[in-house]
Amino acid sequence: MAARLTDEQKKRIIADYVESGSYRATARKNGVVADTVRRIVQSDGGIVQKATQKKAENTLDMLEYMDSRKGQAQGIIDTYLEALADPEKLESASLQQIATALGIVVDKFTKTTPAGENALSKLDEVLKEIGGVV
């Protein structure tokens, strides 16, 4: 006969299920079978609903926090961009370091839009032309 799960293990299984939404993934993560996960989750549907609601609230809280810090984050980004444009720093950096930094900046500013995909393609072409970097 298999050992009974502790209350702590059951809580972990419920939390993992809320996170993944999958009986099988939760079962693999916790070393039990999917039927055990299903039984635990279905035995107290209210707790799953509460955990799901709490997860949504935590997500909203984090988004609100990030929004409240947007100005500070933008200031930090501006500082880094200025440092990347510093001629002395560029002189001492290798071509690979410059290409990597440029790639990161372009990727973060443009990749999520169709225009950004075009910009990345054009950047690749330019980098190939100036020395086969890509």
Image (tube, grey):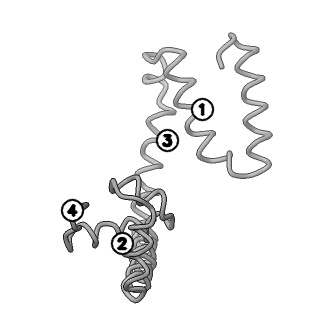
* CA–CA distance in space, label 4 to label 3: 57 Å
Expressed as whole percent of the image width and height from the top left, the position of residue 114 reads 79, 49
Q: Are marks 4 and 1 in contact (CB under 8 Å)?
A: no
Q: Which residue is mark 1?
A: 103
Mark 4 or 3: in front is 4
Expressed as whole percent of the image width and height from the top left, the position of residue 25 reads 46, 56
Whichever of labels 2 and 3 marks the residue nearer the N terminus, that label is 2
At 45% from the left and 18% from the top, the residue drawn is 93
* CA–CA distance in space, label 4 to label 1: 53 Å
Q: Which residue is mark 2?
A: 14
Residue 124 left/right relative to 81: right
Q: Which residue is mark 3?
A: 81
Amino acid tagged 2:
Ile
Whichever of labels 1 and 3 marks the residue nearer the N terminus, that label is 3
Secondary structure at badge 4 equals loop
Amino acid tagged 1:
Gly
Crowding around mark 1 (Cα neighbors within 10 Å: few <14, some 14 to 19, many 20+) is some
Secondary structure at badge 1 equals helix
Question: Does 72 appear above or below 7?
Answer: above
Q: Which residue is mark 4?
A: 3
Whichever of labels 4 and 1 marks the residue nearer the N terminus, that label is 4
Expressed as whole percent of the image width and height from the top left, the position of residue 134 reads 66, 20
The residue furthest bottom is: 46
